[in-house]
Every structure is written in structure tokens, then in C-alpha cells.
Amino acid sequence: MERIEVLKTYKIFIGGQFPRTESGRYYSLKLKNNMTVNVSLSSRKDFKNAVVSARGAFNAWSSRAAFNRGQILYRIAEMLEGRKEQFLEELKQLGYSAPKAKKEMEQCVDRLVYYAGWADKYQQLHSSVNPVATSHFNFSVPEPMGVVSIMADESTALLGLISVIAPCIVGGNTCIVLASENKPTCAITFAEVLATSDVPAGVINILTGNRKELHTHFSSHMDVNAVINSNSEKEFNKTIGENASLNVKRLFIWDKNWIDEKEQGPYFITDLQEIKTTWHPIENIGISGIKY
């Protein structure tokens, strides 16, 4: 008998696990080799579950040493490099030429390494000791915002996704990401990399589905601290902005050409930071050794 090939099931990624979408819905995606795959059509309940997971992971992730978060990003890059051939094949199935797939794959790995290097450095660049008129030290330091919902770039399968996840998590935030609706398969394979790369469960959650349906949930949930849209639709951005204002979420429109190496840097990290200022009294010690 002719062997039946075992085809991949593209589920979603929540809390370090791969559940089927709560709604049981899916949409069909036709690949270049004429194969059709079914992709999960995530629901509002899936998003809520992902927010609960991201919030539960936030305290432990944000309190980790900065260099440790950098180590984990570097580990993701290592694992991605090791599975390069699989990703190249998936990119080509999505319509990429071989040279374009190779370039995007290399940029994905390089971008993770780049942000891993910033993990314990952006704080020095964006913090300060402020001059004050009283006998106090006054420090301003960046701290992570919290849970970030992200709608990834539609024009790339993997690079746009990684380019927004990396600066988000390296700064101590946790996230829920909606993958490209037209090119979602690499995002779920990337989730398999995350599941084996020392990333704690819940730090990164990846959903697939219809952006027209989900963008309102991504921007209106009251336990989300910031929302990013990597696409430029004016109608979507108007709705997202109105919803974000309900609990004063930070809103960012990162409509970037992620293939350009200029579209990376510490400012993507600090966009998702809040500056906290601390006052501390100065203890004056006299000649006799008495504090006054």
C-alpha cells in the first residue's frame, strides 16, 4: 500500500501549549505546491485565554536579570538557525523565491541576536540621574509596560513577526501576537521553536485568524497595557485608537519595511517601557562620623 503522508496541523500557541482554537473554526490556505492547509481561526475566547496567560507570566519574566533575557533570545536564534531548512521550505511554499527566503531567514536570526545584545544595555542609554535642588538622589529608569497585544506585519511571513516580538520581550514585557493572516504557517512553526528555547510559558502567545474580526479584541481588552499594529489601514487604526483610549493603552503603529536593517534599534524597546522616577535622601556624614 502507498504510504499516506502525515500532514502538519497548524494550531495556536497559548501558555506554552498548542491548543485547538476554542471555536473549532478554521480557514483554508492554499500553498504554492497546490496543497491546502487548515489554519485556526482564533476567537475572542482564545484571545482572552492568551491575555490571562501573558499576565500570569509577566511578573516572573520582568523580574529576570536582563542578561538572562538576552541569553534566552540568543537561544531562540540558535534554535531557529538549526531548523533553517524547514523554514526555508515553508517560506517557499508561501510563494517566496529561494533567494528571498534565504535572505529573510538570515535576517530573522540576525535580528534576534541583535536584540539579545541590547538586553542589558538599553537601560544605561535611556536612564538618568537627574539634578535636583534638595539633598536627594533622583533616578529615572525604564521599566516594562506589561502585556502587549500585537498585530504582525501582513507582508512578511516571519521577519515582521520576529521584529516586533524581540524588542517587546527583551524589555521584560509579555505579548499576544496575531500572525499574518495570509502567511501564518511559519508563525506556528516558530512557536515550536519558542516551546523548546527556554522561553517561559505565557511570555509569547501566537494566534492566527481574521484581523478584521480580532483587531477590536486586541485593542479593547482592559488587561492589555499597549497595542501595536504593524499595518497601515486607516479604518483599523481609527478603531484601535478609540478602543485603546478606554483604559489609556499605549498605541503604536509600526508600519515598517522590516527588511530594511535600519528598522531595528533600542527605540523599539523603549517604546514599550515606562520611565519610573525614584527619590532617595542623601545622608550627610560629618567629621565626627555622625549622620545628619
Image (cartoon, grey):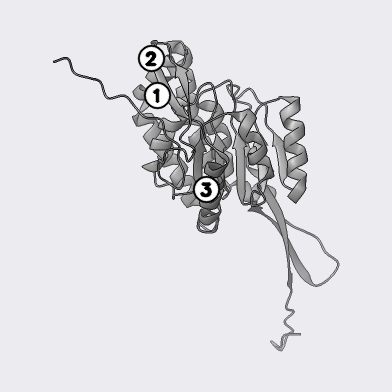
Quadrant placement of the N terminus: top left
Q: The residue under label 1 is which amino acid type?
A: Phe
Residue at the image point whose x is 64% and y is 38% from the top: 268
Residue at the image point whose x is 34% and y is 27% from the top: 8
Residue 103, horizontal then vertical, whole percent? 48, 18
Residue at the image point whose x is 74% and y is 84% from the top: 286
Measured in 3D between alpha carbons, the distance from the residue under mark 2 to the one under mark 1, in whole angstroms, is 17 Å
The one nearer the camera, 5 or 185, is 5
State the image quarter where residue 163 is shown. Answer: top right
Which tag is nearer the camera, tag 2 or tag 1? 2
Q: Is residue 160 above or below residue 92?
A: below
Residue under pointer 3: 49
Residue under pointer 2: 35
The one nearer the camera, 247 or 216, is 216
Q: Is residue 279 above or below residue 195?
A: below
Measured in 3D between alpha carbons, the distance from the residue under mark 2 to the one under mark 3, in whole angstroms, is 31 Å
**In this rendering, position of residue 2 left or right of residue 132:** left
The residue most toward the right is: 133
Which tag is nearer the camera, tag 1 or tag 3? 3
For the residue labelled by badge 2, is the local secondary structure a helix, a strand or a loop? loop
Mark 2 surroundings within 10 Å by alpha-carbon count, few (fewer than 14), some (14 through 19), many (20 or more) = few
- Can you see residue 127? no
Mark 1 surroundings within 10 Å by alpha-carbon count, few (fewer than 14), some (14 through 19), many (20 or more) = many
Measured in 3D between alpha carbons, the distance from the residue under mark 1 to the one under mark 3, in whole angstroms, is 28 Å
Residue 251, horizontal then vertical, whole percent? 72, 40
Q: The residue under label 3 is which amino acid type?
A: Asn
Residue at the image point whose x is 76% and y is 48% from the top: 246
Residue under pointer 1: 87
The one nearer the camera, 61 or 269, is 61
**In this rendering, position of residue 27 left or right of residue 268:** left
Q: The residue under label 2 is which amino acid type?
A: Met
